[in-house]
Amino acid sequence: MSPTTGSEHRSLHVLTPSSDESLTTEWAGGKGKNLHTLTASGFQVPRWSIIGLDVFAEFCRDSGLDEHLARLLTDGWESNPGRVAAEIARLIEAAPIEDRITDAIGLAYGLAGGGAVAVRSSGAQEDGARHSFAGQFDSFLNVRGLGEVVAHVRRCWASAFCERSLRYRAQHRLPPGAGGVAVIVQRMVAAERSGVLFTADPATGRSDRYVVSAVHGLGEGLVSGAVDADTVVLDATTGEPLTTVIGDKRERYDAGSGAGCRVSPVVGEDRATPVLTAADLARLHETGVRVTAHYGAPQDIEWAIADDTLWILQSRPVTTLGPASGSAPEPGGDLRIWDNSNIIESFSGVVSPLTYSFAADTYAKVYDSYARALGVRGEELRAVQEWTPHLLGYVHGRVYYNLFHWYRMVRLAPLYPLNRRVLEKSLGVAESISDEVADTLHPFTPRTGLRGRIARLTRTTIFAARFLTIRKSVETFHRDFYRAYTVFNNVDYDALPGHETYRRFRRLQRELIEKWGPMQILDATILLSVGLLALLTRRWLPAAPEWFTWAAAAPGGAVESAEPVWALRELAAQARADTRILHLLEHVPDSDVRRALRGGGHTRFLAAVDAYIADYGYRSPDELKLEVPDLHENPAGLFPLLRDALSETGDSHGPDRGGEADAYLDQHLRGPRRMVYELVRSKARTALTDRERLRFCRTRAFGAAKRMLRALGRDLARAGAIDTWDDVFLLRLEEVRGAYEGMIAHTELRDLVVLRRRQLAADTALHAPSRFTTRGAPYWSGNLERAGWTGGPAARSGARELSGVPCCPGVAEGPAVVTDTPRDIGGGILLTYRTDPGWVTALSSAAALVIERGSPLTHVAVVARELGIPTVVQVKGATTEISTGTRLRVDGAAGTVTVLADPPRDSRTAAPDSPRTETHQ
């Protein structure tokens, strides 16, 4: 039986970074498994190999030790652990060792590079989430030569049963276990500085603090307590030092010429000077963030710095966190980043529980289907299904991206480094995560070795095939969607029994929503093609203005989702042609306009209104919020939008931004490079055009679901389960489903409605941050209070110029109209915190568009480019700093919003003056 690096049939396991993860989990012990994970995740870990747990088991069988261990570790070992430990150590030291065991140890020594190595124990339960076994097993530094390595491996094996280890087991009521330990053989690092980093304060339990201890030389002096180390407390978010205590550091430990460590004095100047520089602390903080994000819990990290390289020697969970002073202990668990980015375009403000739960369920189904479309199967698919239900978070009634999961989703497709950057742009994320943290985010644990390479190649091949045929796939989906949608749309659900409406709702989920997954290849195609276009622009057109890439990628020809704007403009043109219709629109209340049109004999115009609602009735403000009626249910909502469109002047189609991009390319890029650029550009423009088509499909699918769920609310009200039909919005989807599937009693629903109504009223009064982080359970231990959830408005800074991301070039001056609805723009500069697809009808009368959140790829931004409206997005603080009536100058090419004059006192009631717009040159 010869040692191998991961073979089967009772071969002895000597494990390396290339070993399969399943073998590492089984044979490497806790510390060894963590080393494998750290190495696979790209951290700098000194070269290592692991003598598997089975090598010790084989040693015991060969020597007959297994029978002795079974006898010594029977009931009663707790009464005299010292005697048991001494006897086991004597037996392990004296037992003969067979050649094949020596060969396995020799192989491990060679794989670690030979020379000076550390020999470390790795227990099966060591470094776990509940029990760390920290300091219970032996490790030895600066071991040289095979004979010494073999001797120290024996000592590691014996330490599995040492007195302190047995007492630790007795204290934690753990069985003694006869499986022993694996042994790590790791190249020694000639450390100049060493120490420990806790990514939570172990004394107070505060997860907003990192604690660094550092000494000169090797960390042995720190671990043993022989050296009084420096201690630095860092802010967990920024990495800024909060307190620094300079230790005495009288001695330092270094590798000697023989075995063990050489102890030497530290000169006075070095004793009084911090061991770590500011750059060292910054690197440690960054690494701590990455490691914590990877494991999802605070970590105890041993590190060393040699030749300006930061090495991670091991990492284990912090299992001894104390309570924070004056508060309950903070939970461990995942670090999460919550960002409302452009999700606020779909779900603004406080959202009903039914809307959120339906959206979260939809996202989960769609991205599960997306993973399947890329060939993800088995354990990897089950890992994906762990996080797809949590792509969206629901915090105090607001919807947020659970951001790390979106990076995991993007990593399903190839070219992750490029795609994640474009993801951040497309989501409108104001702050990128570091490359190091991004590298730790995987959709599932990546396989290593040949199987891993084959799996990645398979996914890449499937993606490439779908990438090349995406246009055909979109056409097929579009055709099949409308075929099914026609069936769902032409039904009066209020006339059906509730159980029949519920059955059709489930069918809609299967036939319209769950089949959407493969279409997410289109989003991946956009990320890839726009990312490549931006890359080519930076390399070949370095002087291009910032707006250029978005103009070059803008969809060619008419955008389907802009059709409501053109249709509304056509409707406004018909109204202008008849002064009687204009008079009705301007003087009759919205709720009475239809009756007045009919009474006045304007049947032709009324037919045009009905045709608009029939075609675009689902396209309305907050159209994805189930609790907000659309134009089908509230036709009067069309007339304020129509009045705004009446004020539009000038070219209805706006300047040709694609033509501007063409002119710039004609001037600056020719030959083969132009051909390559146009090929990528064409792919991006086509994909963006197709995405707008699919967004219109999404609107209609949500509209059909909205009608069904409202009908179910009326059915539940008739059954007496809820008081009024619209109480259904205060239930979650699973509760509505439970009422029809027999999983929840009807009598439970009223109490839930009362509870949720009270909670949403309190949530509405809170100021919601656009981005924040939590650790562990988000609502616990002050997470949200620290994140900035407060009861008052944000304070103004008095800034006179704000900047954001240029989206559509052009310059406009005029009064700001700060609004959270797309109504009453009146020709001013539309300034808002967020938009949704229903806002496109308000663009007709806007001189410029300023959005605090969102991105250049949000729906309204795409349509604004189509219409030639100067647009700037991601303007931080816009709705806080600027009020209605403030005279602004918006430069869509530079991405600036300049305050020209403060609003007059009566500006809130005055009509905005006529804006002046220039085409960008």
Image (cartoon, rainbow, N blue to C red):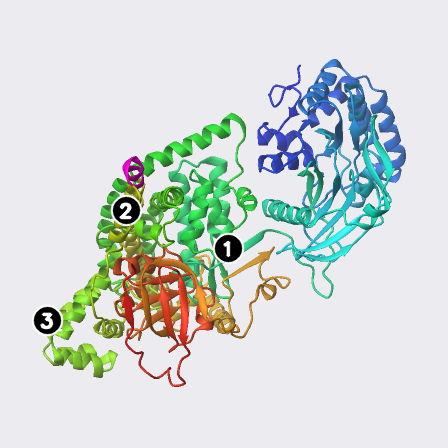
* Between marks 1 and 2 in the image, the one whose residue lies nearer the viewer: 2
Q: Is 47 drawn above or below residue 213 in the view shown?
A: above
x then y, percent, for residue 534? 38, 46
Give SS at disc 1.
Answer: loop
Q: Tell me the residue at 54%/48% (across/down).
A: 434
Question: From this viewpoint, which residue is outermost toward the front?
Answer: 667
Of residues 87 and 495, the one drawn nearer to the viewer in this rendering:
87
The residue under label 1 is 431
Q: What residue type is labelled 2?
A: Gln
Find the magenta span and give its range.
670-677
Q: Tell me the residue at 25%/71% (across/down).
A: 638
x then y, percent, for residue 855? 40, 57
For residue 604, the mark is 3
Q: Tell me the residue at 27%/44% (across/down).
A: 474
For residue 623, the mark is none
Give SS at disc 2.
Answer: helix
